[in-house]
Image (cartoon, rainbow, N blue to C red):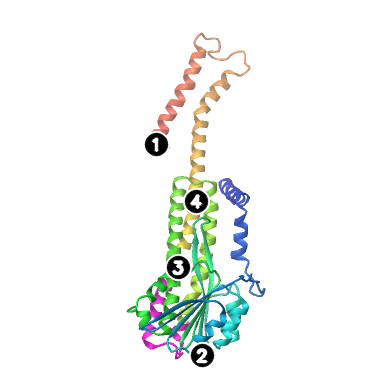
Amino acid sequence: MFKFVQIFVMAKRSSYLDLVLNPLNLLRTKRILHVNPTVIPQRKEPEQINLYVYDYNAEKLDQQQLAEAKDAFLYKNSATVTWINVDGIRRKDIEEICNHFDVHSLVLEDILSIGQRPKMDDIDGVIFCLLNMLYFNEKESTVETEQISIVLGKKFVLSFQEDASRDVFNPLRDKLQLRNNKIRQSGTDYLFYSLIDMIVDNYFVVMEKLSDKIELLEEDIIRNANKRSLAKINQLRKEMIVLKRNIAPVRDMVNGILRSESDLLDERTEKYFKDIYDHIVQANDLAENYRDMMMNLHDLYLSNVNLKMNEVMKVMAIVTCILAPATVIGGMFGMNFDVIPYAHHKWGFYLACGLMIAIPLIMLYLFRKRGWF
């Protein structure tokens, strides 16, 4: 019982020490766990947004950056495929674009919202998907999220991102430059698939980064489990929560697309969404495996702490046993009696010292022979 109390105290000290030295961990916990869907969060609107248009077919590609939202109105009735990518969520511009492209007000509300669960809606002739792009912050060792909304129309695809400085669509932009690429040869539903596919594929990149962190932590715990080890385990477990929370609902989202009977989705494109479904199932399974690994690392840490404590207790017990004969012999010859055997013998002192040395040596030999240390 005393050992378990010591382990609990060490764990508490480790967590407290980590919070004192890194107060951002407490803020991180609040961001992950304190979610209240009834409270409407306020998004800080950017001063300017970036609008990019990719209008293409098999023969030509028109790629340009627009100065304002009204410039995108020209592409509503385009005979070619149009991808309008909006970097930065500003209510005025988003409302103008959505109203002009006949996007339902409920979809507009979801686009402007924060912290939504990944979802899919088929409403008023458009298919709407909301999910999160994931990034791994190497400096902070945290999983960062960015909400993205994708709207599929008859001849257009609208995508709305929060952060204008990064996304995972650069490979798609490079493919659009190639005339013989399948994206250029296909319709809007294939572009819609390609956007979702690249977001899902990037999940594996983030999980690979987390896997490396878990492997390093496991080696560190095996070699030297210290007070920081438990704090690192708790930090990675928080990132597992972020990963699981954003990956698991995407499976239902893709499944909703597969069950949709919308005319916007061609039957030939269905197999590609099935491929995304397979990937997201695999990603969800990996996230479960990583969570189990973190639980195993926690058990491994406690086992190592217990093992170290047992080693310390064993050494202390051996030292106590070795010193016990000397204590007994010294105590016997130190008693206040007039008559003590060999008390006045000329070799009495040397005999007592010899016994104090010989008996512990014999005990060490017996302990070693039994394999106690």
Q: CA distance from mark 3 to mark 4?
A: 28 Å
Specify start and end residues of the magenta stretch as a single range. Answer: 256-283
**How many other residues sit within 10 Å of disc 1, few (<14), some (14-19) or many (≥20)?**
few
User: Residue 39: percent from the left, percent from the top?
Assistant: 67, 73
- For image coordinates 36% across by 86% down, the residue present is 268
Callout 3 touching callout 4 (CB < 8 Å): no
Q: Which label's residue is closer to the chain start, 4 or 2? A: 2
Residue that badge 3 annotates: 203
Q: CA distance from mark 4 to mark 2?
A: 55 Å
Residue 269 highlighted magenta (yes or no): yes
Residue that badge 4 annotates: 301
Q: CA distance from mark 2 to mark 3?
A: 30 Å
Q: Which type of secondary structure does the marked residue at label 1 adopt?
A: helix
Q: Which label's residue is closer to the chain start, 1 or 2? A: 2
Labelled disc at residue 187: none
- Marks 1 and 2: which is nearer the front? 2
Q: Amino acid at mark 3?
A: Tyr
Along the viewing direction, whichever of 138 and 306 lies nearer the viewer: 138
Residue that badge 2 annotates: 125
Q: Which label's residue is closer to the chain start, 1 or 3? A: 3
Residue that badge 1 annotates: 370
- Marks 4 and 1: which is nearer the front? 4
User: Residue 273: percent from the left, percent from the top?
Assistant: 41, 80
**How many other residues sit within 10 Å of disc 2, few (<14), some (14-19) or many (≥20)?**
some
Q: CA distance from mark 4 to mark 1?
A: 29 Å
Along the viewing direction, whichever of 163 and 369 lies nearer the viewer: 163
Q: Which label's residue is closer to the chain start, 2 or 3? A: 2
Whether residue 54 sits left or right of residue 38 in the image: it is left
Whether residue 229 is situated above or below residue 320 in the rendered picture: below
